[in-house]
């Protein structure tokens, strides 16, 4: 039986392949950008509040910093306790035009040894995990010099 | 400037992994603080508890649980929770009652019994909770954020893992002298370098543990202190509990992204620096006047960050300040004379109170082997989840 592909979180990203984008919102009154999306009220304290419109974020950015998770994170992170823990890199990426830093996991196979502050990366579709019926999808950061 | 409040008593239950109830640690610390103040529990008009989240109904709603354990005597009660800044906000609430004339003398208590392993969010399926989401989507434990900050310092300022290890070596040597610390053994740079990487570039000995512990203070008006016969009490001159300003551009726990600075120019200083500046302004004191600082070294690299945020040195120069020995015993501005979180491990609601206990003993010239000479002015600094932070300035 094939699994259904379902976003691990609703409304934070869209598209496949080169069309993949993180989704934020932007205030129509003050142009403040929000990720994770803010759908109720603009958080700029100087803004009376405008309509919040969904926008795609820049696909590419530069690494602000990075680290990794050498030990198995606790629940609600889902991992198979039967399998040995495979560390993954975490990357904080600065998007230039939005002037925002967004954290994400690196694509599988990329370790901290492959990364550097200032390196260009892009948001790509990724898989957070699978259970019997569902493939939970997410965003990953991938160095632009790498093709998977 | 705001009026001072007196610190009449300070008390702690030793930090450790004792496997008993937080109520026991907090009550022991409270009794120690009352004894130190020369007061009886029945003399206390108000009690403020800092809550633990690990006891159901946040720490049984802490102030009342401690009041019951000490024996109900009708005192006014308040309880606060502010993540890692809970203890400092309990001090702030007590101080506000005293300065408003609502109470003469207030007991402040915080205690925790920490679980094993990483701190984790409360259970259930809660996709609206940012703390739950960062674990669910990224497996981003607290140490991974510390790793991000450490790597950023290495890239921007040239800090090295050896610099970070030196913080641990300094703090472990001080913790070895502190009977309330959990870790009483000196540590070498080689031992830090040989410990397991937890969140690159940080190793196990770069990261603070989670501990059981309890701390308490007896605070009063200066008038009450005089009547009580305390001639020169340690005085709290400032308690800063400011929040960040939009847009906050440092990735703070438990956030998955910073605010965007696309529409609004960020303030020239970071949230952490603003916490300290508010304390300096309230106290009318400048960084040059400090005798010592107790800072929240959740990691070794974060201790260096605080040197800059407290204005002990210019941005990027913290590792140099450390290497010169300025923040070691006998240096210009000893930092974490208590041994810091490196030697204690974090007992969340007790930790910011414990920082003030250390200032109190240092300013009384009663800190034994770890005494900072001629200690006259001390500062604490702390930061926690969800935009909480604190800084307390005490003088004598």
Image (cartoon, coloured by chain):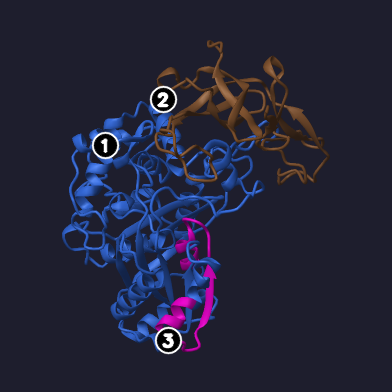
Chain colours: A brown, B blue
Whether pointer 1 and pointer 2 mark residues with C-beta atoms closer than 8 Å, the reply is: no
Q: CA distance from mark 1 to mark 2?
A: 22 Å
Q: Considering depth in this image, is B351 or B289 the residue closer to the camera?
A: B351
Q: CA distance from mark 3 to mark 2?
A: 55 Å
Chain of the residue under the numbered disc 3 shown in the image? B
Residue at 60 percent of width and 43 percent of height: B133
Say left or right for B260 vs B311.
right
> For mark 3, what is the residue?
B71
Chain of the residue under the numbered disc 1 shown in the image? B
Which of pointers 1 and 2 indicates the residue nearer the eye? 1
Q: Which mark is residue B195?
A: 1
Of the numbered discs 3 and 2, the one sitting upstream in the chain is 3
In this rendering, the answer to whether A84 lies above or below B49 is above
x then y, percent, for residue B393: 40, 59
Mark yes or no: residue B167 visible.
Answer: yes
Residue farthest toward the front in the current orientation of the protein: A1
Say left or right for B179 vs B113.
left
The part of the image, by quadrant, that contains residue B187 is top left
Residue at 31 percent of width and 40 percent of height: B204
> For mark 2, what is the residue?
B155
Whether pointer 3 and pointer 2 mark residues with C-beta atoms closer than 8 Å, the reply is: no
x then y, percent, for residue B91: 46, 67
Q: Residues within 10 Å of mark 3 (few under 14, many from 20)?
A: few
Does the stretch in magenta take in B88? yes
In this rendering, the answer to whether B306 lies above or below B15 is above
Residue at 17 percent of width and 63 percent of height: B368
Span of residues in magenta:
B65-92
Q: CA distance from mark 3 to mark 1?
A: 46 Å
Mark yes or no: residue B329 visible.
Answer: no
């Amino acid at each position: 039986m094939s699994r259904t592909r379902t976003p691990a979180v609703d409304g934070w990203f869209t598209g496949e392949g080169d069309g993949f984008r993180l989704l934020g919102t932007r205030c129509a009154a003050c142009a403040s950008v929000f990720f994770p999306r803010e759908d109720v009220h603009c958080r700029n304290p100087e803004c009376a509040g405008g309509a919040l419109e969904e926008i795609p974020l820049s696909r590419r950015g530069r690494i602000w910093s990075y680290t990794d998770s050498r030990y198995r994170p606790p629940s609600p992170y889902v991992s198979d306790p039967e399998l040995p823990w495979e560390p993954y890199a975490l990357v904080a990426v600065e998007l230039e035009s939005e002037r925002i830093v967004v954290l994400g996991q690196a694509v599988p196979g990329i370790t901290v040894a492959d990364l550097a502050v200032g390196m260009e990366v892009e948001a790509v579709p990724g898989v957070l995990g699978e259970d019997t019926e569902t493939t939970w999808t997410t965003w990953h950061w991938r160095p632009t010099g790498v093709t998977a | 400037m705001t009026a001072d409040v007196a610190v009449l008593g300070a008390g702690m239950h030793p930090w450790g992994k004792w496997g008993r109830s937080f109520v026991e640690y907090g009550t022991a610390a409270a009794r120690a603080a009352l004894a130190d103040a020369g007061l009886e529990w029945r003399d206390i008009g108000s009690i403020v508890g800092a809550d633990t989240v690990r006891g159901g109904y946040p720490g049984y709603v802490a102030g009342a649980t401690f009041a019951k354990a000490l024996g109900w005597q009708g005192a006014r009660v308040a309880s606060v929770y502010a993540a890692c800044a809970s203890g400092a906000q309990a001090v702030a609430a007590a101080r506000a009652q005293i300065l408003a004339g609502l109470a003469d003398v207030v007991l402040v208590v915080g205690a925790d019994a920490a679980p094993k392993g990483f701190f984790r969010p409360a259970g259930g399926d809660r996709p609206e909770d940012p703390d739950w989401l960062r674990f669910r989507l990224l497996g981003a434990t607290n140490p991974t954020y510390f790793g991000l900050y450490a790597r950023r310092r290495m890239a921007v300022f040239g800090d090295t893992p050896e610099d970070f290890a030196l913080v641990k070596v300094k703090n472990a040597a001080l913790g070895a002298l502190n009977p309330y610390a959990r870790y009483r053994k000196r540590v070498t740079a080689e031992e830090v370098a040989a410990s397991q990487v937890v969140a690159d570039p940080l190793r196990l000995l770069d990261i603070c543990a989670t501990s059981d512990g309890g701390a308490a203070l007896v605070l009063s008006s200066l008038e009450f202190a005089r009547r009580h016969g305390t001639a020169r009490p340690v005085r709290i001159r400032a308690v800063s509990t400011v929040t960040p300003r939009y847009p906050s551009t440092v990735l703070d726990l438990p956030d998955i992204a910073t605010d965007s600075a696309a529409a609004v120019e960020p303030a020239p200083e970071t949230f952490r620096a603003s916490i300290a500046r508010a304390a300096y302004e309230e106290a009318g004191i400048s960084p040059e006047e400090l005798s010592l600082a107790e800072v929240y070294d959740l990691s070794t690299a974060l201790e260096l960050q605080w040197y800059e945020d407290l204005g002990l040195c210019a941005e990027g120069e913290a590792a140099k300040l450390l290497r010169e020995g300025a923040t070691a015993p006998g240096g210009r501005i000893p930092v974490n004379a208590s041994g810091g979180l490196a030697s204690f491990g974090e007992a969340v609601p007790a930790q910011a109170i414990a920082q003030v206990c250390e200032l109190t003993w240092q300013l009384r010239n009663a800190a034994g082997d770890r005494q900072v000479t001629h200690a006259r002015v001390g500062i604490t600094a702390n930061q926690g989840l969800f935009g909480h932070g604190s800084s307390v300035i005490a003088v004598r």
